[in-house]
Image (cartoon, helix red, strand yellow):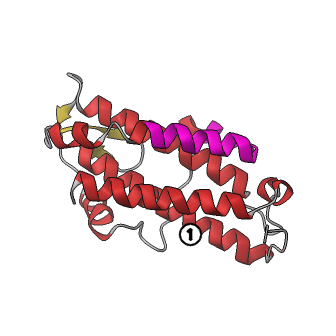
Amino acid sequence: MKAAGLITSIQATTAAYRNRLKAVTAATFVSTPTAGGWSYSEVYAHIFDLSILSLDAIDRCLSPDAKPRPTHFITRAILFFGAFPPLMKFKVPRQFESSVRKISIEEATQLINAFELKLEQYEEKVIQANPLLKTAHPRLGYLNALQWLRFTEIHLKHHLKQLSRIARQDNFTSLRP
């Protein structure tokens, strides 16, 4: 797990989000699926708001407030395998519930742009970070800078799959050709 490879993977995943954004109509983007759950819009707001916050966590790993801490076994397994356990459901932590909101396609594009711009600054920061110094993740315990970057990659891919499930679930026909 190297910073450059993770950033390349994150950039490719972000490109997939952009492509999906180009393929969906504004009405479909904000439509709540018939079976419930998040709309495309809510997924985009959540994932890019929290991806930006994950990059902020990398900065905290570089600060004097970071401390040497252990990483939980389950967290190490998630980071190693690159996926959340299949039967494990996570709710959005209370402090981040506001990230699940309906936004427009334009706002989603702006969030993606802000994330990509910020991501460009992080490869060198992660390389220079002390792997022993960590900051808390609300569900996974303590992560170092490289682990935060890996988490960002996993989280982005997880919600990309969610977008596919939303599309299949409602068999959306209001996609752009």
Q: Quadrant of the image for the N terminus?
A: bottom left
Q: Identify the residue at horizontal 79%, vertical 64% (top origin).
A: 33
Q: Residues within 10 Å of mark 1 (few under 14, many from 20)?
A: few
Is 64 on the left-hand or right-hand side of 159? left
Q: Identify the residue at horizontal 71%, vertical 51% (top origin).
A: 41
Is residue 109 located in the magenta-colored stretch of the structure? yes
- How far from the left and from the top, in percent, is residue 17? 58, 59
| Magenta-highlighted residues | 97-117
Is 92 on the left-hand or right-hand side of 144? right
Q: Identify the residue at horizontal 22%, vertical 50% (top origin).
A: 71
- Main SS, magenta region, reads helix
Q: Is residue 167 above or below residue 52?
A: below
Residue identifier under label 1: 161
Q: Quadrant of residue 106?
A: top right
Amino acid bearing label 1: Lys
Viewer-side residue, 173 vs 68? 173
Confirm whether residue 38 shows in the render: no
- How far from the left and from the top, in percent, is residue 49? 55, 40
Is 23 on the left-hand or right-hand side of 28? left
- How far from the left and from the top, in percent, is residue 51? 47, 44
Is residue 42 located in the magenta-colored stretch of the structure? no
Secondary structure at badge 1 equals helix
Q: Identify the residue at horizontal 28%, vertical 59% (top origin).
A: 5
Is 129 on the left-hand or right-hand side of 170? left
Q: Quadrant of residue 161?
A: bottom right
Q: Quadrant of residue 168?
A: bottom right
Q: Quadrant of the image for the C terminus?
A: bottom right
- How far from the left and from the top, in percent, is residue 19? 62, 62
Q: Is residue 169 above or below residue 57?
A: below
